Amino acid sequence: MGAVKTKRMPRAVREQQMLDAAVQIFGQRGYIAASMDDIAELAGVSKPLVYLYLNSKDDLFTACIRREAQALFAAVRAGVRRELPADRQLWDGLLAFFTHTARHPDGWSVLHLQARTHGEVFAAEVTVVRAGIVAFVTQLIAEAARDALARSADRAPAGGASVDPPLPERDVAGLAEALVGAAESLADWANATPSVTARQAAATLMNFAWTGLGELMAGRRWSPPSA
Amino acid sequence: MGAVKTKRMPRAVREQQMLDAAVQIFGQRGYIAASMDDIAELAGVSKPLVYLYLNSKDDLFTACIRREAQALFAAVRAGVRRELPADRQLWDGLLAFFTHTARHPDGWSVLHLQARTHGEVFAAEVTVVRAGIVAFVTQLIAEAARDALARSADRAPAGGASVDPPLPERDVAGLAEALVGAAESLADWANATPSVTARQAAATLMNFAWTGLGELMAGRRWSPPSA
């Protein structure tokens, strides 16, 4: 009888298989309960090979966080077409976000729950990624506000009073934080509520955020009662 | 020479002093770096007394989480007067929330950062509290929607078509999640941005959320482009 021929596979492919298995186990069982034995078994490789490639449980977990963060960010970026109107950009971005988190619930759990619950090192990984997403959203809102300003300037009577920018920089930063926080919270809720689809979650947030943002872009504000 | 007379103080008062010191140290240095020596010193008591009263660093941390959660929830509840119109209730609630988190940045850090970063046991404490806050906000939005419905029914012509509820229950739940997530995210940002006051943070979220919610209450929705 001939020796069993080991199927040779490029290292990169094997690593992705290990990461797929690790995201599933970390996401479903949590960081602490996840065992390297289970991850190796699910990936169809030996445990020593996992350690050889990914070094330790902590390094494997970090690699999962980075991969899932990159995939989520890429999905949102790919969903948004900058040449479209602001409301359509927001809708497309939200739909891409909730579609991705609904399709990859284990990845979302790793990113938003597990990574933030098991120590400062992992939480710091997520903080960096989140800052990148907030910066991306800030840029989208700032551009939409500039477009709205340009349109309102076009409509202003010649020689009329100058138009104030509808959204100061600090407000744009705050709105981006609010939008990202709302999306994170809704993704947790949508994934925990079986009857809620990605499209419904995106529509809920769009209805919550857009008319408010839309009115702001047009220079209309809700005024608080005096102190 | 006479013996130093120990100032007797009720246990409850001493415990609050220890918790005050612990929230400050946990909030500013983080759960891991915080030492029981430093907490005892800041509280002006001996370390054995801290252990006698609060048992362990973990129990002390849990007591901090519970106290800060209760204080935040109480501040928001106290800010909202249910007899006022919905926009005023939302504004008062947001202002109470951001005023509390701005005045107690260490408590907010314990609740929203430290408690969620250092293991499932502490994170579970926060999950319970957060669910209570989401339930409270859900109830506020549902009542506001019912009021809006009653007003629109009053205006409907006699014998006219029945008015659909403007906000199905699932949407109300999703909106509450979005609002709480946005508020958490903005509180982190406001506390990290020295130039942002509690009133400004509340106004940013009100402008983001209210017009959107306000339009929803009136039965107007943003419609997504067809799939």
Image (spheres, coloured by chain):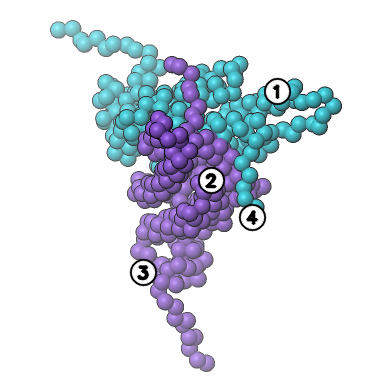
Chain colours: A purple, B cyan
Residue at the front extreme of this rendering: A158
Q: Nearer the viewer, mark 4 or mark 3?
A: 4
Q: Amino acid at mark 2?
A: Asp
- Label 4 with label 3: CB-CB less than 8 Å: no
Give the quadrant of residue A226. top left
Dot 3 corresponds to which residue?
A52
Q: Which residue is mark 4?
A: B227
Distance in Å between CA atoms under marks 1 and 2: 30 Å
The residues bearing labels 1 and 3 have C-alpha atoms spaced at a distance of: 68 Å
* Residue A4, position as x, y percentages in the image: 49, 86
Residues under numbered marks 1 and 2 in contact, where contact means CB atoms less than 8 Å apart: no
Q: Nearer the viewer, residue A37 or B145?
A: B145
Q: For marks 2 and 3, give the one nearer the viewer.
A: 2
C-alpha gap between disc 2 and disc 3:
48 Å
Q: Residue furthest bottom?
A: A1
Q: Is residue A172 visible?
A: yes
- The answer to whether residue A156 is above or below residue A137 is above
Determine whether B172 is above or below B53 in the image: below
* Kind of residue sitting beneath label 4: Ala
Q: Which mark is residue A150?
A: none
Contact (CB < 8 A) between labels 4 and 1? no
SS assignment at label 4: loop
Looking at the picture, how far across and down is residue A73, in whole percent? 45, 55
